[in-house]
Image: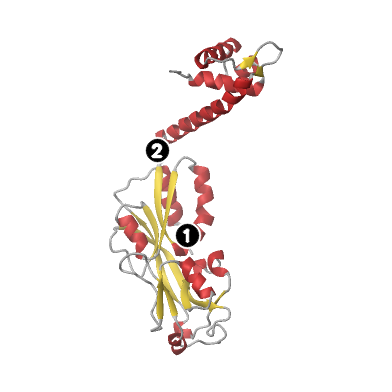
Amino acid sequence: MISLNFSHLQCFVAAAETGSFSAAGRLLGKAQSGVSTAVANLEIDLGTRLFDRSRKYLRLTEEGEVLLRDAVGIVQGGERLKDRALSFCAEEDTHIRLALDEGVHSQFVEQFLAPFESGFPFTELDLQTGIFNDVEECVASGKADLGLLISSGIPKRLEAYKLLSYVSFHAVAAADHPLTGKEAVTISDLEDERQLVVTSRGDGKDTEVTHFSPKRWLVDSYGACASLVERGMGWAFFPATILNDPLVQRNIQQISLELEIREHASPLYLIRNKNRKVGKAGRWLLRKLGEYAM
């Protein structure tokens, strides 16, 4: 059974990249003789010659060229392993589970993911999406550590939460829908047309939207609802946070409502599972999300 020494592989890769044992030694901070001996021992372990030493400069053998690709992968993987282990020693989280309401998902991605990736490259981020009480369910049940929740009231199942802002909802329809062309749509007008109601995915089918029309279809995704609205299948309430999202922007326009029913707003909460301790990455997210405003 072949036993490989990681240091020997490093010397092999460095010698192949620099073209000489002395240059590889300078790169690795080792003596030239130490690099040469390491490569010779690796050749013994592998049972094949890696370099042609008959010329002034090192030249890979055919076998060496093939094995170099594997060696590079092993060395790079080892370096990643070392960096990841060091990050854990620095109290960085191994992973963070974050539940987001679909209504704020796009804004979160735009504002937070790039700096998070830059600051915590070895922390695994598990992004979960839901609508209304789906998010609270994920955090309360332990499936997620943190969440951004759009809700009709204060969270009922969690003690750790913070009110961040309010999200306004607007009525929308397709550009050629009968309601879009009217200047002041009344409650009676809304009642005459099918309403598409976005709900949570749980058994309760929670929704933050008033039911105006007796003709209703329930949809558990803003993307799916936008597709139906775009095709003229009905009108719906969408949060202002996603009206500019490519998923819902297409052939959809706001409806001009009478003043008394023009819009309503729902609270946006940052919620947390107190049983889950977080490290540097989690604390960074809590701080940044705590500053989040619509």
* C-beta proximity under 8 Å, tags 2 and 1: no
What residue is at 59 percent from the left and 12 percent from the top?
Answer: 36
Q: Position of residue 166 (x, y in %)?
A: 43, 68
Q: Nearer the viewer, residue 211 or 193?
A: 193
Label of residue 91 in the image: 2
**Residue position for label 1:** 105
Q: Secondary structure at mark 1?
A: helix
> Can residue 47 be seen here?
yes
Kindly indicate the quadrant of the structure image that contains residue 150.
Answer: bottom left
Q: In the displayed structure, would residue 292 be above or below residue 236?
A: above
Classify mark 2: residues with Cα within 10 Å, few (<14), some (14-19) or many (20+).
Answer: few
Q: Nearer the viewer, residue 268 or 83?
A: 83
> Can residue 27 be seen here?
no
Badge 1 amino acid: His
Q: Position of residue 168 (x, y in %)?
A: 46, 72
Q: CA distance from mark 2 to mark 1?
A: 27 Å
- Left or right of 124 in this view: 64: right
